[in-house]
């Protein structure tokens, strides 16, 4: 198993699963009127990445392992 491929795939899958929540789809955050854009952006990103962290981690691990094994099998067959 290729660790570099696993880590890259893990991060890509985790972020892609988190994208709908990062963009605020399905979540409502009630902001105070004085909140600046950076505070809102930071809040959406943190909330999107940390919401349902266990499920996203399991899915990203499974996909990362499968893809890295497929890549290593292809390299061995050449």
Image (cartoon, rainbow, N blue to C red):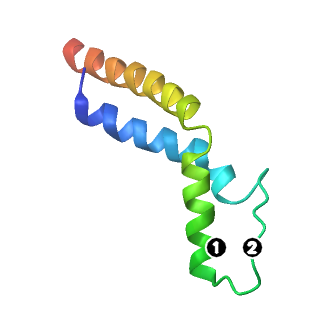
> Would you name the residue on which mark 2 appears?
31
From the viewer's perspective, is 49 left or right of 9?
A: right
Q: Quadrant of the C terminus?
A: top left
Image position of 24 with respect to 34: above or below: above
Tell me if label 1 and label 2 are in contact, CB under 8 Å: yes
Q: Residue at x 61, y 55 (%)?
A: 47
**Nearer to me, 78 or 12:** 12
**Nearer to me, 40 or 25:** 40
- Quadrant for residue 43, please give it: bottom right
Q: Position of residue 22 (x, y in %)?
A: 63, 57
Q: Earlier in the sequence, mark 1 or mark 2?
A: 2
Disc marking residue 60: none
**Nearer to me, 50 or 56:** 50
Image position of 7 with respect to 16: above or below: above
> Would you name the residue on which mark 1 appears?
40
From the viewer's perspective, is 56 left or right of 10?
A: right
Q: Residues within 10 Å of mark 1 (few under 14, many from 20)?
A: some
């Amino acid at each position: 198993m290729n660790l570099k491929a696993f880590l890259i795939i893990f991060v890509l899958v985790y972020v892609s699963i988190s994208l709908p929540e990062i963009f605020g789809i399905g979540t409502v955050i009630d902001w105070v009127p004085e909140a600046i854009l950076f505070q809102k952006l930071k809040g959406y990103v943190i909330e999107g990445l940390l919401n349902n962290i266990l499920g996203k981690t399991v899915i990203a691990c499974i996909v990362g392992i499968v893809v890295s094994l497929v890549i290593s099998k292809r390299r061995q067959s050449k």
